[in-house]
Amino acid sequence: MINDSDTVLVFERGHVQSLIGTPGARRDHVFLLGDFDPQWTGRRAILDPWGKPESAFHEAFERIERSIEGLLDALPSGPGQTGG
């Protein structure tokens, strides 16, 4: 499945390393979702909130939401067009 994907989004650098170790996977198709977050948080990864306080889950959700919005802004809106 990953070999047929144009883009794969992951949360942490370890995920990137795991995926690019998969036969046929291309590093230039794997991205950290947090790189699309328009608000710099001091880290590229979106950390797993498991085992942390409820506030960590809210922070992770907000970061995911912002990052997806940033990703959508970066995508081309049609053939030959730029995002935004």
Image (cartoon, rainbow, N blue to C red):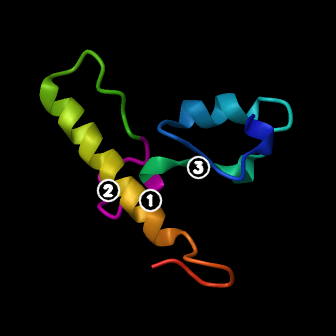
Residues at badges 1 and 3 in contact (C-beta under 8 Å)?
Answer: yes
Which badge, 1 or 3, is on the more N-terminal residue?
Answer: 3
Q: Establish if 55 lies above or below 77.
A: above
Look at the numbered disc 1 and give the secondary structure of its residue: helix
What type is the residue that disc 3 sits on? Phe
For disc 2, the marked residue is 66
Cα distance between the residues tagged 2 and 3? 15 Å
Count of numbered badges drawn on the protein: 3
Relative to 11, 79 lies left or right:
right
Q: Which residue is mark 1?
A: 36
Q: Residues within 10 Å of mark 2 (few under 14, many from 20)?
A: some
Q: Is residue 29 left or right of residue 25?
A: left
Magenta stretch: helix, strand or loop mostly: loop
CB contact under 8 Å: marks 2 and 3: no
Range covered by the magenta-colored residues? 35-45
Q: Which mark is residue 31?
A: 3
Residue 3's spot in the image, x, y percent? 80, 40
Is tag 2's residue or tag 3's residue first in the polypeptide sequence? 3
Residue at 25%, 47% (x, y): give it: 62
- Quadrant in which the C terminus is drawn: bottom left
Identify the secondary structure beneath mark 3: strand
